Image: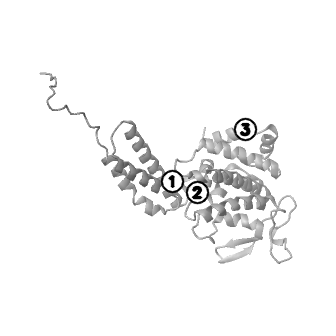
Amino acid sequence: MKSEDSIYEAFLNTLDEDLRSMCAKNEKAEKPFPYPYCGEENVERLAKALVGVLEKHSPDIPGLVPEQYRDDVHEARELLAAAALALLSLYFPQRDSCMRCMAILISLFRHGSNPRFKSSGVLMFEQVSTGMKYSSEKGGYIPSRFVRHTDHKRPYDHVHRDGSRGFTADEDDVVMFFERYRVIQQRVFDTSPRFNFELCVKYPYEALSDNRQNFYYMEEKMEIDLATKVRGLQDRYLLNCAQAKGYDLLDKLMINALLAYLRDGSVSIAARESYVAQTEHLIDGAVKLPCTTSPKEGVSVDRIS
């Protein structure tokens, strides 16, 4: 059984009968989510169930998500899942309300150190809240073609008194869920602009993708590779300590400081990568054999002749 199949089966097994039947009714999709839109409460239940299964199936690489952001990342995963479920069932064809398309949608999110940066994922959701779509061919924004299936209204045609277009959080659940996600994202960004919050949020969704090579951007692959290296160094250091291979106090202080630095998501990947070799050298090269007790002078020592 493929990984995606087992995840979807586990997801269905966590649902109540009513939610399972909603998924089953969407016969046009493979590994389907409900279609048509099943309402705010049901979408929240589906999102929590899905994230719970994904986090259990693909636990975070130790060190990838700093402890102080763990709750924020978990909540953001649930809100982004809810926003994606709502977007797919309200604005996309029925066949797209499925696990594979959710993976594609989540993969479009990308971190930017510039506060004005908007990834393709953000721009996709903003079509609902602004009524506009960014066109790389035109080099600017054009009217979005999104139409809400439940009432056949276009976000672009929904004009407010101030002349702005699109639906508000009170008028559309996609906007409501996504704005709640953005509140968390912005709060974390304001605290640590370099921390790759988007990567941490999207990480478990990789398991839903049938094209994992294209799920991550290059800098995200580098971040994951670095986190894996740091985990290996940490394990090696702890193993050496457990086997009573001696480090003097200065070595321990330096190794712990370097490991903490390598895990610091507020520092650029390139800067942290430059210290991997030094950390590895200290962990492997600073190991000393335990000192043996020397006999005292004047005390005879039995020898095997």
Whether residue 262 sits left or right of residue 196 in the image: it is left
The three-letter code of the residue at mark 1 reads Ile
The three-letter code of the residue at mark 3 reads Thr
Q: Looking at the image, tell me whether mark 3 or mark 1 is earlier in sequence order.
A: 3
Mark drawn on residue 290: none
Question: Can the viewer see residue 210 in this picture?
Answer: no
Q: Which residue is mark 2?
A: 199
The three-letter code of the residue at mark 2 reads Leu
Query: Split into 4 quadrants, where in the image is the C terminus?
Result: top left
Considering every residue shown, the one lying at the far front of the view is 298
Measured from the top left, where is residue 126 in percent x and y?
Answer: 73, 67
Q: Looking at the image, tell me whether mark 2 or mark 3 is earlier in sequence order.
A: 3
Are discs 2 and 1 less than 8 Å apart at CB?
yes
Whether residue 13 sits left or right of residue 113 in the image: it is right
Question: Who's the residue at 29% across and 42% down the image?
Answer: 288
Gap in angstroms between the C-alphas marked 2 and 3: 26 Å
Q: Residues within 10 Å of mark 2 (few under 14, many from 20)?
A: many
Secondary-structure class at tag 1: helix
Are discs 2 and 3 less than 8 Å apart at CB?
no
Q: Quadrant of residue 237?
A: top left
User: For this rendering, which residue is in front, 110 or 74?
Assistant: 74
Question: Can the viewer see residue 162 in this picture?
Answer: yes
Question: Who's the residue at 49% across and 52% down the image?
Answer: 227
Q: Which residue is mark 3?
A: 14
Q: Which residue is mark 1?
A: 224
User: For this rendering, which residue is in front, 68 or 301?
Assistant: 301
